[in-house]
Image: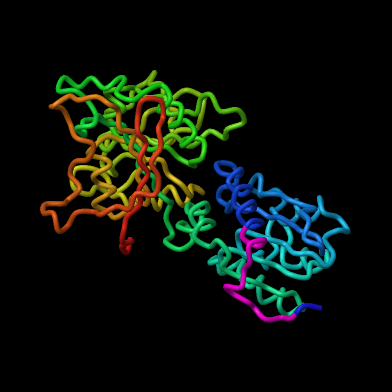
Amino acid sequence: MATAADRTGTADAADIAAMRRAVALASRGLGSTSPNPVVGCVVLDASGHEVGAGWHERAGGPHAEVHALRQAGVLARGGTAYVTLEPCNHTGRTGPCAQALIEAGIARVVYAVGDPDPQATGGAATLRAAGVEVTAGVLEAEAEAGNAAWLTSVRLGRPYVLWKYAATLDGRVAAQDGTSRWISSPESRADVHRLRAEADAVVVGSGTARADDPHLAVRGIEGAVQPLRVVVDTGATAVRPGARVLDDAAPTLIAVAEDAAPDLPGTDVVRLPRAGGGLSVPALLAALHERGVRSVLLEGGPALAGSFVAAGAVDKVVGYLAPVLLGAGPAALAGAGITTLTDALRLEITETARTGPDLRITAVPATPKER
């Protein structure tokens, strides 16, 4: 039987390769596991050959370890399991994965990220107590990035927020006359549907609702779980009967001020406190979190984006920059409460890619702030 020591940081090339595959498997669950995490698992037999693989496919369904162990069968005995998140140690809608690994005869478990959920943590200790060798922290940063939404929701008690915008090279999101369709390319707009499919909720403001009458549902992605469509309509005046967002393609929530006009008949409405010229962003995120939303795609205009930035509630930015110049018109961000360069929200670019003729830039705050 292997040693019970937790050998953090002793991974070799084979460990890294297997964990990288597990991280890739985990990503297949994006958009369908909330409010649970995305998790991937790979099982190698005692000789180092892959005999099982799986991922958490949907909330309430078997966890990644269970899928991989079922595929491996008896070949799992004496082998190694690679899991992107510390195996759970509690019984919820499914049994504890730590116990399933022990019963399968796994000799060693390698995991990337420790489980911060106080109800589920402790799997590593259970495994070590059973004589299973445990190695932690392998490809931790990659696994953290892939599971950012769930980890943020557990650690901060609010949904993870990705702000997406499309702009010209000179930073305009619309022309001076207000026209904005289409700044970005068809390829970029298709990519946005991928982002929607990975999110639990899509949020826009009243300005976008009035100007564009957006639909906000996912199109062109087979098997996508439709996100909750959220319109921040402070005065309850932007969403009117017949609006596209009120059809039955996806659920919709209208967020209005506590003192706003009566609710639109037949709509799901949440009343929230005012803050500045709009609604309280922390209150909005808390209301969404209570509804099981763990990831938000913020598609609102400059003012709504500014309120999220001012609240310290933007975790990632995805900008689609089109090879277009306007010279006038609204900028991508407004009202963020930043008045001097020293207060600027500095970002770290994590990816650049072409989407048709456009450039997609992905960035995260360089220095995380308390939220």
Q: In which quarter of the view is residue 210 placed?
A: top left
Q: Going by the image, does 90 lie left or right of 34?
A: right
Viewer-closest of 60 and 55: 55
x and y percentages locating residue 337 in the rendered image = 17, 51
Q: Can residue 216 be seen in this view?
A: yes
Asked if residue 88 is positioned above or below residue 193 in the image, the reply reads below
Q: Quadrant of the C terminus?
A: bottom left
Q: In which quarter of the view is residue 203 placed?
A: top left
Q: Residue at x 35, y 45 (%)?
A: 317
Q: Residue at x 45, y 40 (%)?
A: 201
Which SS type dominates the magenta stretch?
loop
Magenta run includes residue 96: no
Q: Which residue lies furthest to the right in this view?
A: 74
Q: Going by the image, does 218 lie left or right of 368?
A: right
Q: Going by the image, does 332 lie left or right of 198?
A: left
Q: In which quarter of the image is the N terminus?
A: bottom right
Magenta run includes residue 5: yes
Viewer-closest of 202 and 366: 366
Asked if residue 31 is positioned above or below residue 342 in the image, the reply reads above
The span picked out in magenta is: 3-16
Q: In which quarter of the view is residue 43 placed?
A: bottom right
Q: Can residue 282 be seen in this view?
A: no
Q: Which residue is drawn at 61% across and 73% down?
A: 10
Q: Which residue is drawn at 60% across and 48% down?
A: 24
x and y percentages locating residue 190 in the rendered image = 46, 26
Asked if residue 300 is positioned above or below residue 209 in the image, the reply reads below
x and y percentages locating residue 363 in the rendered image = 35, 48
